[in-house]
Amino acid sequence: MTLSASVQSAPARAPTPVPARRRARGRLPLGLSVAALIAAVIAVLPLVYLAIRAGQLNAARVMDVLSRVRSFEQLGRSVLLAAVVTMGSLVLGVGSAWVVARTDVPLRRLWAVLAALPLAVPTYVAAYAWVAAIPNIAGFGGAALVLTVCCYPYVYLPVVATLRGVDPAWEEASRSAGVGPVGTFRRVTLRQIRPAAAAGSLLVALYVISDFGSVSILRYETLTVGIYRSFTNNPFDRTAPVVLSGLLVVVTAIIVIAEARSRGRGRYSRLGGGAARPAAVVPLGGRRTPVLAGMTALSGLALGVPAASLAFWLVIGRSGEMDVPEIFTAAATSAGLAVGGAVVTTVLALPVGLLAARHAGWFPRLMERAAYVGHAVPGVVVALSLVFFAVNYAFGLYQSVPLVLFAYAVLFLPLAVAGVHASAAQSPPALEEVARSLGSPPRQVLRRVTLPLAAPGIAAAAVLVFITCIKELTATLMLQPTGTSTLATELWTQTSVRAYAAAAPYAALLVLLSAVPAYLLGRRSHRWGVRHE
């Protein structure tokens, strides 16, 4: 009996995870371990800054900040917003991925692209668009709505990729045993996509915890807003921002640990090539109309409102003067910094993701967890830590392009690590074992087997980092070289003085430059999904 036949005749149950110990064969590769350690050190640099500043603080002042009711109110708002947005993004991301990858919904190619495009809309642009359209939306409800419709693609993209990568024989066996589509989804599909959904949810939670632009526009005072105000209101007193940033780090550690527990210790890679055919399509039948209505409403909330607002202000702005050379110079600067940030961040993420996907033990786990630290520290704190480092130890780097790229790597390393880890974890480790048994040294196995197998996921991670870098505001604003400007900083400058018409061209180009790679991700996600038209 063939492997395919034996899998199809198996009882309807979720695939048994490969035990973690299967990854712990042999010693850790020295070169990969050193590279992962360097990336982890870079990621925890903001913590070094916080530790140095904390050592210079007066204990009485620290207790005074911690005893303020306002501090814990801001902390509670941050945690509540992160929890609501994460749950909403999980539901929308998993639901959208299942519709695109497993159902016969009409225009599936279009929905696959539209589901990824919200990544092209910066959250502060979306927040401005919603406030301009509905002023009363400001507050918790508005912040939760805007961040959810902007962040759910972080869950959608890895889940839809996993749905394409898993062996469909398990779902077919479940349905052949009489289990309906809903039961199969709950008992089989959810277990298969759990690691991808957990990784995407972690990114959403960390993004919301560290967000500043959208919550400040929507007038919802979180911990990041409190940190920023404490910096600007009293620039000579670093006690409050350092203490509040320490609270954020604690919350980050709790979120990362919770994600690790939800992911479990198992892996869900195929044993061999698996089925060559696409997964069977689930007919929607009478549910087609409500599903189409839901997908349309989601796209309208995530894309329609920002597009209408930008179109309005672009039309208004045509009566004014546009400095076209300045606008395109800012666009070129933004694109160049984003490309550099994507390359640097992905290169740093490779050893961390590969080590965590292929080797068990405390060291790979520690390196992976350390990579997530910088993503939850507010951009203003990351920027100030790099300014502190440059001024005291490498003054030539102060307000330079390398320092901006360094900040991007600290902030967005988790995006690349998650993509590299997920892609490497699904490639069969048996192929690497065969290569080593034939006498190939570790570096050759990495170059000729591991990287080619994980290349699609690595490329997708790099594109995701590019999109995020081009939208980044706070660190870019504080670290950009003198005399330069980006689309994000110019947009912020114009909106801060309510020059909405002047800001519209920068916002439109910013969305356009983000939309192109997001569109490519959406097209790729369709190829990850069911190829049945």
Image (spheres, rainbow, N blue to C red):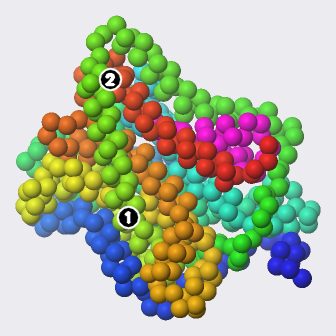
Residue farthest along the top direction in this orientation: 319
**Which label's residue is closer to the chain start, 1 or 2?**
1
Quarter of image, res 4: bottom right
Around disc 2, counting alpha carbons within 10 Å, would you say few (fewer than 14), some (14 to 19), or many (20 or more)? many
**Range of magenta residues:** 92-121
Any mark on residue 503, and which? 2
Give the SS element for disc 2: helix
Q: Residue at x 70, y 46 (%)?
A: 100
Around disc 1, counting alpha carbons within 10 Å, would you say few (fewer than 14), some (14 to 19), or many (20 or more)? some
Of residue 401 and residue 170, the one placed in the foreground of this image is 401
Q: Position of residue 340 (x, y in %)?
A: 32, 52
Q: Residue at x 42, y 12 (%)?
A: 315
- Quadrant of the image containing the N terminus: bottom right
Q: Mark 1 points at which residue?
A: 347
User: Visible in this render: residue 419?
Assistant: no
Q: Distance between the residues labelled 1 and 2?
A: 34 Å
Of residue 442 and residue 355, the one placed in the foreground of this image is 442
Of residue 217 and residue 343, the one placed in the foreground of this image is 343
